Image: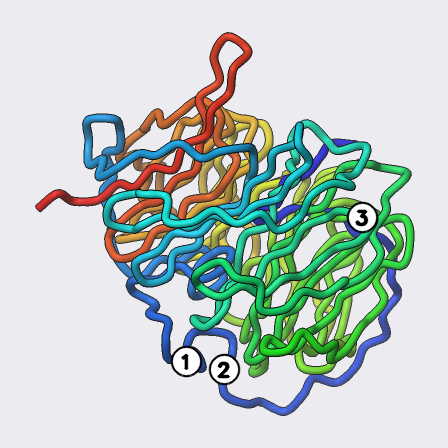
Amino acid sequence: MKSPNARSGLACLFVLMLSTIPLMAAEPDQTGLSLYSKLSPESDWPWWRGPTRNGHAALAAPTQLSESDNLLWKVPVPGRGHSSPTVIGDRVFLTTANEGQQTHYALAFDRTTGKNVWQKELNKGAFPTGNHPKNTEATPTIGSNGELLFTTFYHHDQVELLALDFDGNVVWKKNAGRFRPRKFEYGYAPSPLIYRTSVILAAEFDGDSFLASFDAKTGKEEWRTPRPNNITFSSPVVAHVAGQDQLLISGAEKVASYNPQTGKPLWSVSGTTNATCGTMVWDDDTVFASGGYPKAETIAVKADGSKKVLWKNNQKCYEQSMLAVGGYVYGLTDQGVLFCWRATDGKEMWKQRLSGPVSASPVLAGGYIYQADEMGKLYVFKPNPQKYEQVAANQVGNDSFASPAICGGQIFLRVADSQGGKRQEYLYCFGSKN
C-alpha cells in the first residue's frame, strides 16, 4: 500500500454504509473567514488549503522563483515534517519533529525577516514504531481561528489535539482518541479543520476510527461519529454546496457528506477506492474526489443528496488534492500527467506530461496555478481549458512534499535539499522586492 502524506491533506478510509438523509435547510455560508474578525482572506493563510479551503488565494504572487528571483528570505527548519506553512499576521507557523530524539515542536517565524521567533517542544517520546518513509511525524498543517493555533500529533498510541497561543504556550490539550495502526503502520496525517467555533479531526485506522468535533476555546468534545476501521490520511473539509455547509471526506470506497454541526451523516455514494489521500474539492453543487489504493478513480458527485454520480474515470491523484476553477478540474496525477476535465461531465479537455511523483497540492493565485512535484519542480500555468499554458517551471530545493501558502502577494514554501545522504529543510518566502 502506498503511503499518503497529509499536507495536508492525505488519506485512506474504509467501508461505511450510509443511508440517504435529507439535507438541512439552507443557511448562510459559515465555511470561510466571515466569523473570524482577526483573520484576513487577503493577507492570511490560516489553515490547510487556505482561506477558502480549496486552494484559492486572494492575491497574485510572483511566478519566477529561485535563489535569485523574488526571494525575500530563506531560513533553515530543524527536524523533519510535511506540514504546510500557516500564515497569520506577522508570523509564519510550522510543526516539525526530531525523529531521533522523539520530540515534536511548533515553530514561529517572523514574516518580514524569516527569523525564528520561538520553538516550543510539545511532546517527548512514544513515537510510533513504524511510519511510511513518505510520511513524517509532523505532517498535519496547523489551523487557526485568529485567536489560537490548533495542531495534532500522533504519539503514546493517541492523536493529541493542542491549542496554543501565538507565543507558543499550550492553552489546552486533549487526547482526541486512541490511534494505533497495525495493518498499515504508516503514521498519521489529517490536518485539523476549523469550523465556526469548533475544531474537527479525522482519525482512521484498523481500530475505533472517528470524526470528532471539539470546542475551540476549551477542547470539550462536542460530537463523535464512527468511521470505517481502516487506516486513512485524508483531511476532511467543509464546503458550502447545494445550499448548505457539508463536511466532505472520501475513501473506503465511498464519497461521504456529514453535517459539520452534529456529525450526522447526510449522504454517501460508492466511489474512489479503499484509500484516498487528498482533500475533496467542489464546483457549484458538485464535489470531486480522487484516489488511490489499490485502484485508481476520480469521481464527480452531485452534492444535493440525490447520490447522482456525474462522471468518473480511472485516473488518480492519490496523495495530492486537485483544484477546481471556472467550471473545470485540474489534477496532476501520480504519474506526472496533468489533466484538465470539464466539471459538468468529465470531458478530458487536454492532458500534458509534466513530472512526478506528486504529494503537494496546487494553489490558484493571480490567475495562475502553482503545482509542485516531489523533486522540487514548481510548475506555474494558466487554468486554460483549451490548452496547457506554462508560465514557469521553478526549481526550489529537491525534496518537496508540503503545499505552498500564498497570501499577501507572498509565497511560502517548505522544501528540503537532500545531497550526499544529508537532508536539510528550509522555509522560503518569495515576493516582490518593490
Between marks 2 and 3, how big is the CA–CA gap? 38 Å
* Residues under numbered marks 2 and 3 in contact, where contact means CB atoms less than 8 Å apart: no
Residue beneath disc 3: 156
Looking at the rendered structure, the kind of residue marked 1 is Ser
Residue drawn at point x = 38 percent, y = 52 percent: 92
Q: Nearer the viewer, mark 2 or mark 1?
A: 1
Position above or below: 197 against 186: below
Determine if residue 282 is in view: no
* Residues under numbered marks 2 and 1 in contact, where contact means CB atoms less than 8 Å apart: yes
Q: Give the camera-side residue of 315 and 228.
A: 228
Residue beneath disc 1: 34
Looking at the rendered structure, the kind of residue marked 2 is Asp
Q: Nearer the viewer, mark 2 or mark 3?
A: 3
In screen coordinates, is 162 left or right of 36?
A: right
Residue 23 picture quarter: bottom right
Q: For the residue carrying disc 2, how many other residues have a C-alpha within 10 Å: few (<14), some (14-19), or many (20+)? A: some
Position above or below: 183 against 91: above
Of the numbered discs 2 and 1, the one sitting upstream in the chain is 2
Q: Which structural element holds mark 2?
A: loop
Q: Residue 304: x percent and y percent?
A: 65, 76
Position above or below: 26 against 187: below
Position above or below: 271 against 247: above
Residue drawn at point x = 89 percent, y = 59 percent: 208
In screen coordinates, is 286 left or right of 296?
A: left
Residue drawn at point x = 30 percent, y = 58 percent: 90
Q: Which structural element holds mark 1?
A: loop
